[in-house]
């Protein structure tokens, strides 16, 4: 069966099958990371829906909304190759009528770490994800660990608002040299790409330590060595569920999260560590 491209709600309803549905929300410019999410979805439901929507609500006024890469035809090919049944690619004016009023508020958790650097980002992200859940009505939705706070916030929304969907996290896919795949990597020049490797290197240096202060210090040292070509935004060692900084006595999982600017490109990455 060929891939169905649903451009609006009516198309989407027509495309709905009888069995279980897994949703993979994306902003397009699909790469191996997205492919792995689609494969995870494929293994969990009868029908896989990939949404492609560059959500204006989650971009700040000085962010890259207008220059965000848009590669729709290549994206359709990726979805075909990975065996998705439906691509849902709505127009912004259909998703957000001019008279809309109500949106999702991400709370305190949406104002810390990544949320502190990107005011309004998590409100916009949660609003579109809840709308996608209501439109597609998936049994399962798959998100990447690459955007660790996004994944944590979506789990929080689903718990707090009793949204009837199972959230599945999928591991971060990396280039052989460690760089986490991102649609934004295509903004990087060859030189900038070399500088950007400091993010994953810093995470590995942190992961080699055992105590929070040492983990933070080891990662920070790598990032400092890459300055000023790399401009650090934040380095945080946080609880995976709340994104609050972990105390020195913390045991169990912690997320070492980093965001930095390399040239005009803002990159994020993280590693999940287990502290004993
Ligand atoms: P985006 O298109 O960047 O909004 O990402 C769509 C989904 O793909 C999100 O759930 C991301 O976390 C996930 N994703 C992005 N990059 C990667 C990666 N390198 N590995 C795994 N998942 C990823």
Image: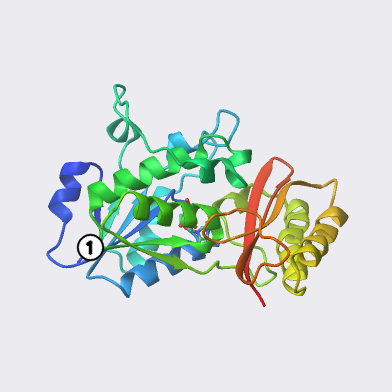
Q: Is residue 14 left or right of residue 47?
A: left
Identify the residue at horizontal 67%, vertical 77% (top origin): 276
Q: Is residue 16 left or right of residue 192?
A: left
Residue 69 coordinates in the image, percent (x, y): 51, 44
Q: Quadrant of the N terminus?
A: bottom left
Q: Is residue 268 left or right of residue 172?
A: right
Residue 258 coordinates in the image, percent (x, y): 68, 54
- Give the class, few, some or many, for how many residues have Cα within 10 Å of label 1's Cα (few <14, many ≥20): few
Residue 82 visible in the picture? no
Q: Is residue 198 left or right of residue 100?
A: right
Residue furthest out toward the front: 249
Identify the residue at horizontal 42%, vertical 37% (top origin): 105
Q: Nearer the viewer, residue 66 or 44?
A: 44
Residue 238 occupies quadrant: bottom right
Identify the residue at horizontal 16%, vertical 67% (top origin): 19
Residue furthest out toward the bottom: 276
Where 101 falls versus 227 (above or below)?
above
Q: How is the image coloured?
A: rainbow
Where 249 falls versus 228 (above or below)?
below
Residue 13 coordinates in the image, percent (x, y): 15, 49
Local SS, label 1 = loop
Q: Nearer the viewer, residue 92 or 69?
A: 92
Label 1 belongs to which residue? 2
Where 66 falls versus 254 (above or below)?
above
């Amino acid at each position: 069966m060929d891939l169905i491209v649903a451009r609006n709600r009516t198309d989407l309803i027509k495309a709905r099958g009888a069995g279980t549905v897994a949703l993979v929300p994306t902003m397009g410019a699909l790469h191996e990371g997205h492919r792995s999410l689609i494969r995870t979805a494929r293994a969990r439901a009868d029908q896989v829906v990939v949404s492609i929507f560059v959500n204006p609500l989650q971009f700040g006024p000085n962010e890259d909304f207008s220059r965000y890469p848009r590669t729709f035809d290549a994206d359709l090919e990726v979805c075909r190759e990975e065996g998705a049944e439906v691509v849902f690619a709505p127009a912004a004016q259909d998703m957000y009528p001019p008279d809309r009023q109500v949106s999702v508020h991400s709370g305190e958790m949406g104002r810390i770490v990544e949320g502190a650097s990107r005011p309004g980002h998590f409100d916009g992200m949660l609003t579109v994800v809840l709308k996608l859940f209501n439109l597609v009505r998936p049994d399962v939705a798959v998100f990447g660990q690459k955007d660790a706070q996004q994944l944590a916030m979506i789990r929080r929304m689903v718990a707090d608002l009793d949204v009837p969907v199972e959230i599945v996290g999928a591991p971060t896919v990396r280039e052989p040299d460690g760089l986490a795949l991102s649609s934004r990597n295509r903004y990087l020049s060859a030189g900038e790409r070399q500088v950007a490797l400091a993010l994953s290197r810093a995470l590995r240096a942190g992961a080699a330590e055992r105590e929070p202060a040492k983990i933070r210090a080891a990662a920070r040292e790598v990032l400092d060595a890459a300055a000023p070509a790399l401009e650090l935004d934040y380095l945080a060692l946080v609880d995976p569920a709340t994104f609050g900084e972990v105390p020195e006595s913390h045991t169990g999982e912690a997320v070492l999260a980093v965001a930095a600017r390399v040239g005009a490109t803002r990159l994020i990455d993280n590693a999940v560590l287990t502290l004993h």
